[in-house]
Image (cartoon, helix red, strand yellow):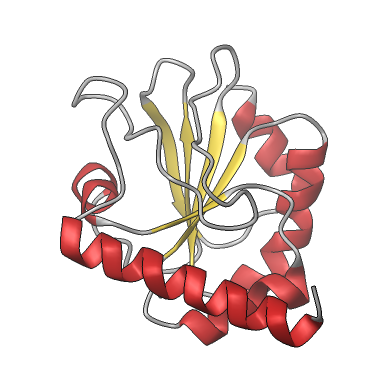
Amino acid sequence: MKPHNFDRFIFWLLYGLIISIIVSGSCTRWALSQESAPWSTIAIVPNVGTTIELHPTKNTLITFFVTTCPHCQAEVEVLNTIHNSGYPVIGVITDIGNVKGIIKFFKAFKPSYPVVLHNHDLLVKFGEVPTVPTSFIIGSNGDILKRWEGHQDFETYLEWLQI
């Protein structure tokens, strides 16, 4: 596929997913109880059409970000290293109306971890995310173990993931 055709493909794919989310109200189905984090969220990029499952034995790092945020962009390299080291990482895009920005972000920063669109169910569970990046450590049982705002270094993330 030529690069120009790939851009068009991603654009229309994201456009269709955003419209379906708006029409349906969300793209999340609850896999755990209401007291747990929302799981089995449809990932849009880079694992188009797959679902994310809560890791059965490891804590998971979830980070809410905006594609144009310099701190969020800088965080991708650290999150890629964490993910490539075997720890579950999930990104949540909060600027879902910025389809062109999302495409540009993925081309420039190439996150190796799954990324999902922010939706109503995530908002209900995690609350407002007034600052980005805002991150959570979710236990293998679905409990929220830690929440913080801002970017951290690799060692801090690893320490928190091993709580």
Which residue corresponds to the image point at 75% horizontal and 41% vertical from the top-left? Answer: 82
Is 101 displayed left or right of 144 in the figure?
A: right
Residue occupying image coordinates x 44% and y 36% = 146
Who's the residue at 32% across and 62% down the image? 129
Considering the image in quadrants, where does the N terminus appear?
bottom right
Front residue of 84 and 106: 106
Question: Which residue sits at x=76%, y=51%?
Answer: 80
Left/right placement of residue 89 relative to residue 39 reads right
In front here: 43 or 134?
43
In what quadrant of the picture does the C terminus appear? top right
Query: Can residue 36 be seen in the rendering of this structure?
Result: yes
Residue 114, horizontal then vertical, whole percent? 60, 47
The image position of residue 47, as x and y in percent, is 62, 48
Against 23, is 148 above or below?
Answer: above
Nearer to me, 26 or 124: 26
In x, y percent, where is residue 106? 68, 70
Number of callouts: 0
Residue 3 sits above or below residue 22 on the image = below
Where residue 157 appears, x then y in whole percent?
67, 41
